[in-house]
Amino acid sequence: MIAFIQRVKSASVEVEEQIIGNISQGILVLLGIEKEDNEDTAHKLLEKILNYRIFADENGKMNLSLKNIRGELLVISQFTLTANTQKGLRPSFSDGADPVKAKMLYDYFVSQAQPQITTQTGKFAADMQVSLINDGPVSFWLQV
């Protein structure tokens, strides 16, 4: 499971010209789900994201987590993160989970996040427009 995370001052997602999710300070997660992923993988990645220390403390050091600052989470499914780009000029998506499994794990990831932190989402498999104000910019690729 892959997460491209961005520390944001705000972020939102639109589907069919309607905002369906938006957050203030927090983390925007673009989530890619691979064939071998399962609920355990989702849980490990979620815990890493919630506790990853990417927010500044009183000394300006990245020492605080999303939980520490009581920030918000916006989770967007993005199958293109699973692309193999090693050969040729067209990405291969053969490492990505099939859509049924990916949706199940995406929903599981979100359901595990919601009791812990304010969580908004995009719409699985929809054409989405994502807007953000990247704070820093601070962006990380996490994979478990």
Image (spheres, grey):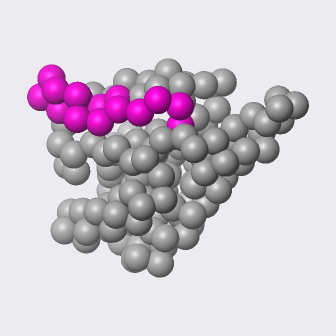
Specify whether 61 is left or right of 135.
right
Main SS category, magenta section:
strand
Image location of residue 32, percent across then percent down? 40, 55
Q: Is residue 94 shown in magenta? A: no
**Along the line of sight, the residue nearer the viewer: 100 or 136:** 136
**Along the line of sight, the residue nearer the viewer: 119 or 28:** 119
Q: Is residue 13 shown in magenta? A: yes
Image location of residue 143, percent across then percent down? 56, 60
Q: Residue at x 47, y 29 (%)?
A: 24
Q: Residue at x 34, y 44 (%)?
A: 120
Quadrant of the image containing the C terminus: bottom right
- Can residue 68 be seen in the rendering of this structure? yes
Image location of residue 141, percent across then percent down? 58, 48
Image location of residue 54, percent across then percent down? 69, 41
Specify whether 143 is left or right of 104.
right
- Please provide the residue range marked out in magenta: 12-26
Q: Residue at x 64, y 56 (%)?
A: 51
- Can residue 140 be seen in the rendering of this structure? no
Identify the image quadrant of residue 106.
bottom left
Q: Residue at x 48, y 41 (%)?
A: 72
In the image, residue 88 sits, relative to residue 47, either above or below, namely above
The outermost residue toward the right is: 59
Number of numbered markers? 0
In the image, residue 79 sits, relative to residue 108, either above or below, namely above
